[in-house]
Image (cartoon, rainbow, N blue to C red):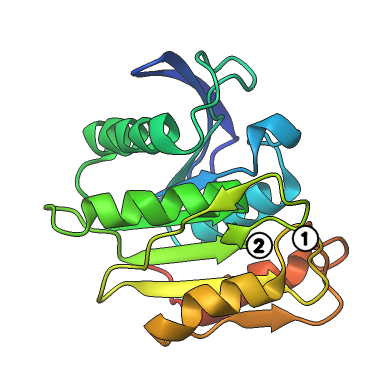
């Protein structure tokens, strides 16, 4: 049986300069996925364990997965832009992935601030030639953060998008009620992991299993 390729490190180009990224590739690429990490001003990076877990789960479904660092993280150039420039950067990453592998089925994943950015990206692509088909949002940033320092006006998801929304019962960064308030008018189910905090310490295997049980491999 062919094995996945080792994780690859690349530098891509974005509007603010270099985008530092990791790539996880299955033995046979049948789809494209981009996974985003948590807030860059609070230690978020593409090596984050939740982002890594989501990326490997997508890889196991047949996706070539790109994990970019947001602006100012690692070798990525530019400065934090509160989701605006970050959205443009992810669109650039998707364009690069399509130039390398072709217009394959597209999936997005994000954790915390990264999930907020991916909601924006999904909306931008909804009416294009390659809309997002699958979306994983873990510990999603919505509403006001628990510390009161940040406010996220997370847009509703496009229609006909298969989504998996996972939140920890004990999340003390983004209260569960925020995500339920966002999901309720859209009639979107939210999977609540009992006992999980924002970073899903000791619960990462549940995220991996949820993705594997929600979607069949491509």
**The image quarter in which residue 177 lies:** bottom right
Q: Is label 2 in contact with label 1 (beta carbons under 8 Å)?
A: yes
Q: Name the residue located 62 percent from the left edge and 81 percent from the top edge.
A: 191
Q: Which residue is mark 2?
A: 139
User: Of 126 and 212, which appears nearest the observer?
Assistant: 126
Q: Position of residue 170 (x, y in %)?
A: 83, 72
Residue 106 lies left or right of residue 177; in this view the side is: left
Q: Please, what secondary structure does the residue beneath circle 1 have? A: loop
131 w.r.t. 103: above or below: below
Can residue 169 be seen here? The reply is yes
31 w.r.t. 93: above or below: below
Q: Name the residue located 55 percent from the left edge and 78 percent from the top edge.
A: 181
**The image quarter in which residue 178 lies:** bottom right
Q: Name the residue located 28 percent from the left edge and 56 percent from the top edge.
A: 123
Q: Position of residue 202 (x, y in %)?
A: 88, 65
Residue 207 lies left or right of residue 43; in this view the side is: left
User: Of 184 and 55, which appears nearest the observer?
Assistant: 184
Q: Which residue is mark 1?
A: 198
User: Of 123 and 47, which appears nearest the observer?
Assistant: 123
Q: Name the residue located 51 percent from the left edge and 85 percent from the top edge.
A: 189
Mark before the other along the chain sequence, 2 or 1: 2
């Amino acid at each position: 049986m062919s094995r996945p390729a080792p994780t690859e490190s690349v530098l891509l180009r974005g509007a603010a300069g270099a985008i530092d990224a990791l790539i996880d590739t299955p033995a046979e690429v049948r789809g494209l996925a981009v996974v985003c990490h948590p807030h860059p001003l609070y230690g978020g990076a593409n090596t984050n364990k939740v982002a890594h877990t989501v990326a490997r789960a997508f890889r196991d479904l047949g996706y070539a997965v790109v994990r970019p660092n947001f602006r100012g993280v690692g070798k990525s150039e530019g400065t934090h832009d509160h989701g605006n420039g970050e959205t443009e950067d992810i669109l650039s990453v998707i364009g690069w992935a399509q130039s390398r592998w072709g217009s394959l089925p597209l999936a997005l994943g994000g954790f915390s601030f990264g999930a907020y950015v991916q909601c924006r990206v999904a909306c931008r692509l909804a009416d294009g030639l390659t809309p997002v088909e699958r979306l994983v949002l873990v510990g999603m940033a919505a509403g006001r953060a628990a510390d009161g320092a940040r406010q996220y006006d997370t847009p509703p998801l496009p229609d006909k998008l298969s989504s998996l929304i996972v939140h920890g019962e004990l999340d003390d960064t983004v209260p569960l009620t925020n995500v339920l308030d966002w999901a309720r008018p859209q009639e979107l189910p939210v999977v609540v992991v009992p006992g999980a905090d924002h970073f899903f310490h000791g619960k990462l295997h549940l995220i991996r299993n949820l993705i594997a049980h929600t979607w069949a491999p491509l």
